[in-house]
Image (cartoon, rainbow, N blue to C red):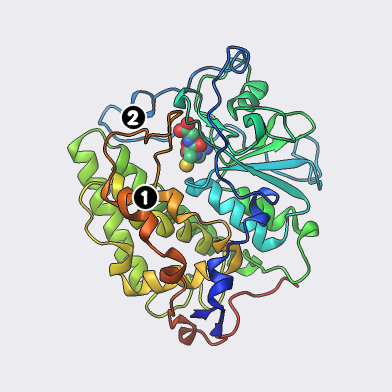
Amino acid sequence: MSCCGGSVAPAAVLGEKKYKSVTDGKYPEPTEFLPITDEDVKDIKPRPNIQNTEVDENGNFVRQQNLFTVPFGDEEGLNEVAAGKYRLIWAKGCNWSNRASIVRELLGLDESISINLVNMSSADIGYGWEFVYDENHRDPVLGTRFLAEHYAKSIPGFDGRATVPALIDVTTGKVANNDYHKLTNYFEVDFRKFHKEGAPDLYPEELREEIDKLNEWLFHNINNGVYKIQFAVSYKAYQNAYDNFYAAMDILEDRLSHSRFLFGDYVTDSDVRLYVTLARLDSAYAQNMGPTKHRLVDYPNLWGYARDLWQIPAFQNNTYFVDFSAHFQSDKNGGARREFLSYTERFVRKINFDELWGSAHGRQWLSSDPANKFIIEK
Ligand SMILES: N[C@@H](CCC(=O)N[C@@H](CS)C(=O)NCC(=O)O)C(=O)O
């Protein structure tokens, strides 16, 4: 198997995920079913339904705004840049939070920003994200059961969706920032003094303007593009979103036919953003988007590019293909929660994702520096 700039990685390395870096040493399977008590939910409200609250008059999906957008810095009124102060809460299926978990690991912020995973409760999805992987379904640092408790602590009476990523201030229990548009940039720029030695420069100063422009385009056309298809509630909105998404994929396929990564020889913040959508395309989004025009594997350049990125440990360690597909969970009697399983869900456990994504991609030959995927920070 070809990995990381042409060197050969033994199958055991690719097959054995280093989950430790993601969840403080625990293999993240949800713990047993746990009933929700009135006490557990005394401060929070049930989760609202997106298709009632986040659509415009034409049936288009209009995503709720991020609520916690205060930047990081030393000035008064900004979020303090400090080690040990924040905990990143993310979910395996969620591309918006996956960006942050990948960048945190790429930069070696593991020591300064702690992390934990949530999932929708198997007992009752009505209260949104829950710390289902932890003992008693309580985050060991924060002591809470639901992410919504932190939103309610920040905005009393909060009745929106408590979303990931959320960077929680462990000293107050409040949400410091959930601005997924900028969170990775804060990690890259403001948290620089805590980066590991030899950390990659994912947001080089001379490229920032171009990266920001491309990120904005990726957001509308790719990252949120799939959700515009999924959540459209009129045929016209669906068709527009569908055509737009596949047109954008064609543009990227072309761009990546002559460039190893989006900005040439080295991985940047934009590549992380494109990767998290591509990684979910065939196994998750295809289930929600209606008839699929093309699969990821039908685009030679995008498919090779996605594998090239996955073969970097920080991408691989934060990617859970089986979870993307298998949304259902066992109920308290051990049965599947959904009556009908999709095609993907039925077969997902038979797919050897490590072998598939670890296969040779040959893309290093598009680079003038084939052995290296990163520029190192000065
Ligand atoms: N913060 C943004 C985007 C983040 C987002 O949508 N996260 C999703 C997961 S990918 C989420 O946390 N959803 C929780 C829910 O729907 O209850 C928002 O509020 O729309």
Position of the C terminus by quadrant: bottom right
Identify the disc placed on residue 151: none
How far from the left and from the top, in percent, is residue 105?
66, 59
Name above or below for residue 337 compared with residue 266: above
Q: Residue at x 47, y 56 (%)?
A: 276
Q: How many numbered discs, if any?
A: 2
Locate residue 195 relative to residue 36 in the image: left or right. right
Q: Residue at x 39, y 55 (%)?
A: 349
Locate residue 201 relative to residue 329 in the image: left or right. right
- Which residue is disc 1 drawn over? 284
Q: Nearer the viewer, mark 2 or mark 1?
A: 1
Q: State the residue lying farthest toward the left.
A: 235
Q: Of 37 and 101, which appears nearest the observer?
A: 37
Dot 2 falls on a residue whose secondary structure is: loop
Q: Of 284 and 226, which appears nearest the observer?
A: 284
* Disc 2/disc 1 C-alpha distance (Å): 22 Å
Identity of the amino acid at label 2?
Answer: Val
- Which residue is disc 2 drawn over? 55
Q: Is residue 213 visible?
A: yes
Q: Residue at x 55, y 63 (%)?
A: 316
How far from the left and from the top, in percent, is residue 103?
62, 58
Locate residue 36 relative to residue 294 in the image: left or right. right
How far from the left and from the top, in percent, is residue 289?
27, 47
**Pointer 2 or 1: first along the chain:** 2
Q: Is residue 64 visible?
A: no
